[in-house]
Amino acid sequence: MTADRPDPQPPFERERFRPAPLGGRGHLVETERFARPVELTQPTSVFLDALPDFLGVRNLRGLAAAIAGSKRTLWGLGGHVIKVGLGPLLNDLASRGFVHGFVLNGAAAIHDVEVALQGSTSEDVGGGLFEGTYGTADETGVLFAQAAAEAAQTGLGFGTALGRELLQLDPPNEELSVLCHAARHELPVTVHVAIGTDTVHMHPACDGAAVGAATHGDFLRLAGLVEGLDEGVYVNVGSAVLLPEVFLKAVAMVHNARAHEEPDAAKLRITTGNLDMLRHYRPRVNVLERPAQQGYDIAGQHEYVLPLLRLAILEAAAREDA
C-alpha cells in the first residue's frame, strides 16, 4: 500500500554529478613539498630543508624568517619554558642579537632564580601541599621580596632588580639564567605577576604593595618596549593567560597615545608567534589575531619546538647574510 504513495523526498540523481579529470583541479598538496630522508652525516641546513613544507613547518619557517629579519624581537616566557632547561638556548639567541627583551611571568622568574642559585627547581606540589612544605623556599621568597622593595622604592624595573640581586649573590649557574644574562648585558627584562599566583607571595617578607608597584612599573616598561616594536616580532612561549593579556593591554596603551598625539599614525605592524603544548583562547586572540599583522601558531612540547625554532632562525639569518 505504501508503494502507491509518492516519496516525499526522492533521492538525488547521480547522473547530474559530473566527474572531472584529477589533473584539472587545483591542489593544496604537491609532492615537491613532501619530507625527504636525511642522513646523520648531513648538515642541519639539509635537515631543515627536508622538513615537509606544510602547516606547522610553514609556521616555523615563517616565524624564524620574521625573527631573523627583525631589528627588534621580544620573547614572552611562561614558567614551563624555563624549568625544562631552555634558558641557555634563549641566552644564546640573545647573544646573537635575536632577543631584544624578555617578558616573564612570575613562575618563569621563580624557576630562573632557583636554577641560578641551586641548579634545580620545580618542587613536588602534590607531595608537599598537605604537609605544609610546598612553596616554603626561603631564599627564593627573600630574593623576590628584596627585588620588589628595591623596584618599588627606586623605580628600577622588577625584572632588572631581580637580575641584579641574583648577580650580587654570584650564583653558581649564572650562565643558565635568563635574568642573570639580561642583567649582565643590560637587556630589558620585565616580570608580570598576579598577587597570590606565585609561591613567593606566601613568604612573610612579601609586601603586596611593593610587588604591585614593581610589577606595574614593569607593565609600563613593557608598553615602552611595545611602542618600539613597529615591524618587530613578539613571541609568546608557554603563557596561556597572563602574558597574552598583559601584551594586549600594552599594545592598547601605545595606540591610545598615538591616537591622541599622532592621529594619522599607522597602527603598529607586529609579527607574532605563539608556542605552546596546547592551543588556548587568549594566545590565539590576544597574540596571534587582534594585535598582529601576521601571526604564527606552533603547537608542541617546548623541549623540542624551541630548539628547532632556534636552528630555523640561525638558518634563516645565514641565508639572509648570504
Image: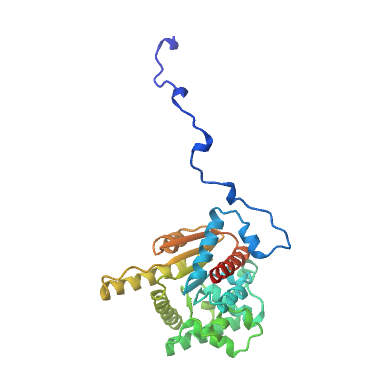
Q: Position of residue 207 (x, y in %)?
A: 47, 83
- The quadrant of the rendering that contains the C terminus is bottom right
| Residue found 38% across the figure and 75% down from its top | 227
Question: Residue 290: in sight, yes or no?
Answer: yes
Q: Position of residue 229 (x, y in %)?
A: 42, 73
Q: Nearer the viewer, residue 168 or 264?
A: 264
- The quadrant of the rendering that contains the N terminus is top left
Residue 106 as seen in the image, left or right of residue 246: right
Corner quadrant of residue 82:
bottom right
Q: Position of residue 16 (x, y in %)?
A: 43, 24
Q: Nearer the viewer, residue 8 or 61?
A: 61
| Residue found 64% across the figure and 69% down from its top | 124
**Which residue is situated farthest in the front direction here?**
322
In the rendered view, would you say 25 is above or below 255? above
Question: Residue 133: in sight, yes or no?
Answer: no
Q: Position of residue 194 (x, y in %)?
A: 46, 73
| Residue found 60% across the figure and 84% down from its top | 139
* Numbered label tally: 0
In the rendered view, would you say 80 is above or below 165? above
| Residue found 60% across the figure and 53% down from its top | 52
